[in-house]
Image (tube, coloured by chain):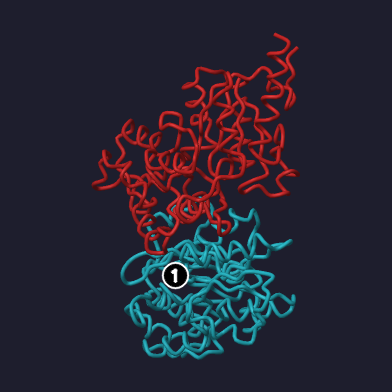
Chain colours: A cyan, B red
Amino acid sequence: MADTVWPGCAKSLKGVILDLCGVLYDSGEGDGAAIPGSIEAVKKLKESDLQLRFCTNETQATREKFVAKLQRLGFDISVSEVFPPAPAAIAVLKERGLRPHLLVHDGLLDEFDSVDKTNPNCVVIGDAAENFSYHNMNEAFRVLIGLEKPVLFSLGQGRYYKETDGLKLDVGVYMKALEYACDLKAEVIGKPSQTFFQSVLNDMGLKPHEALMIGDDLVNDVGGAQRCGMKGVQVRTGKYRPSDERHPTVTADGTVDNLARAVELILDQRGGVRGEG
Amino acid sequence: MADTVWPGCAKSLKGVILDLCGVLYDSGEGDGAAIPGSIEAVKKLKESDLQLRFCTNETQATREKFVAKLQRLGFDISVSEVFPPAPAAIAVLKERGLRPHLLVHDGLLDEFDSVDKTNPNCVVIGDAAENFSYHNMNEAFRVLIGLEKPVLFSLGQGRYYKETDGLKLDVGVYMKALEYACDLKAEVIGKPSQTFFQSVLNDMGLKPHEALMIGDDLVNDVGGAQRCGMKGVQVRTGKYRPSDERHPTVTADGTVDNLARAVELILDQRGGVRGEG
């Protein structure tokens, strides 16, 4: 019988999905900073027989610009391996004939170039950071409250993230604000939505039990992946807090100091597999 | 048996509590604008045998400055008749030995002059309007997340209000944002808190069934007053929306076009009382 407990479960894995911010790097001024050991860890995973994808709720830049930043930080990552919420949102908007009012980061605007934004009949919010001004929140609110059937899409639902100069509020906080203001429930596109995780699994051609998610966000990375049937491991970097290890509803399959340690444990297990094969 | 249905119930009233913004005036640039007929309506109530108080969630100015504005608009109102949340909050802070980090409107800061704000161990938010910047929200969030037992006081929990240039988000929206960010429940000081309504009733020396609340906010004015045992009447001014009249949980005892009409109905009923007396 297969070992289902971390790290033994790594023997039967066929793919790994990594969160980016807080796992590979900390965001902040300029490009932010790579977390020690993470560049080498990604390299080792790529050299292994595991499939590798990156699943992020990053919405401060287009996918192209975001991946270029990761490459500048030293990571061997290509655009087709990275899954952020905005392209998924654009697919939904087009499918449902919706024209968004955008409350997003300036860096993300180009991603929506191909989308009709005239006479908006929904609102899309991302991690708009400084753009979450009172003025812009009022503007988004007025669009929603003026619609007969208000529709709010939130690119992720994170509470906060860590930048090099401290914790910052994430899009989920402003999603809750607009939900309360308009008495509605937002549709989340991104982690922890199961549709979102499933699209990454589909891309790898894997079943949930064949994949492992590694992230710093207990609820959105680990809990979301687990609800999809994947294993979920939390790293003690990024937004990790000690209280995560006694969370009332989500328990990670494993908790490790950082990505380098997680990859070491995974490859050690699989070294054993190959040795036995 | 006493008539318990509006407007017949007005015969047995001993006091009336009025909301201010959206009932007496619309806020906006400068002092805002008095709602037609409301100056005369307040005058008529003052000339009647009814006690009169003003219960507001206004937190953009000290009580003194706020009342001075109402006087400039033409209302015969004195400071001792007006009950806003900030003085009630200050009493709670002093009673519990709490030192607040303030996220409030610049105009309210003076009200907290006497309060120790060093090394904060709680956060107080009011209707901070433009001060609800991403920077200031992050600052409040970091104070809360850094506390072992985070305490958040919200001066009211309104969703939005109407200014002369449109609807604006109210403090409740940002309360929900910080509640979600820190996974906590705020303590609301102001309407619809029963403690807050009760303090106004105490000041009049009246029992709940002897008083009527008139407001434009169905949930916070009407619903809050009703949960205290008072009657609650909604005016179709300020933030009133037609959908309020088919709200799933709160049904006003009466809905009238404006304060002038409400006062006319009340005094008509009481004219009848006096005629019979």
Question: For mark 1, does the 10 Å Cα neighbourhood hold few (<14), some (14 to 19), or many (20 or more) residues?
Answer: many
Chain bearing tag 1 is: A
For the N terminus of chain B, give its image quadrant: top right
Kindly state the secondary structure of the residue where label 1 is placed.
helix
Q: Is residue A176 visible?
A: no
For the C terminus of chain B, give its image quadrant: top right
Where residue B106 appears, as percent x and y from the top left, is 35, 52
Q: How many marks?
A: 1
Between B211 and B34, the one lying in front of the other is B34
Between A192 and B76, the one lying in front of the other is B76
Q: Which residue is mark 1?
A: A129
User: A215 above or below B35?
Assistant: below
Instruction: Look at 35% across and 79% down and name the residue there.
Output: A32
Between B38 and B111, the one lying in front of the other is B38
Amino acid type, residue under disc 1 in the picture: Ala
User: A130 above or below B242?
Assistant: below
Where residue A16 appears, as percent x and y from the top left, is 53, 78
Between B184 and B92, the one lying in front of the other is B92
Instruction: Look at 52% across and 63% down and name the residue there.
Output: A137
Instruction: Look at 40% across and 75% down and name the residue there.
Output: A259
Where residue B252 appears, as percent x and y from the top left, is 70, 35
Quarter of the image for residue A111 reads: bottom right
Where residue A219 appears, as percent x and y from the top left, is 52, 61
Instruction: Look at 48% across and 40% down and name the residue there.
Output: B188
Q: Is residue A96 visible?
A: yes
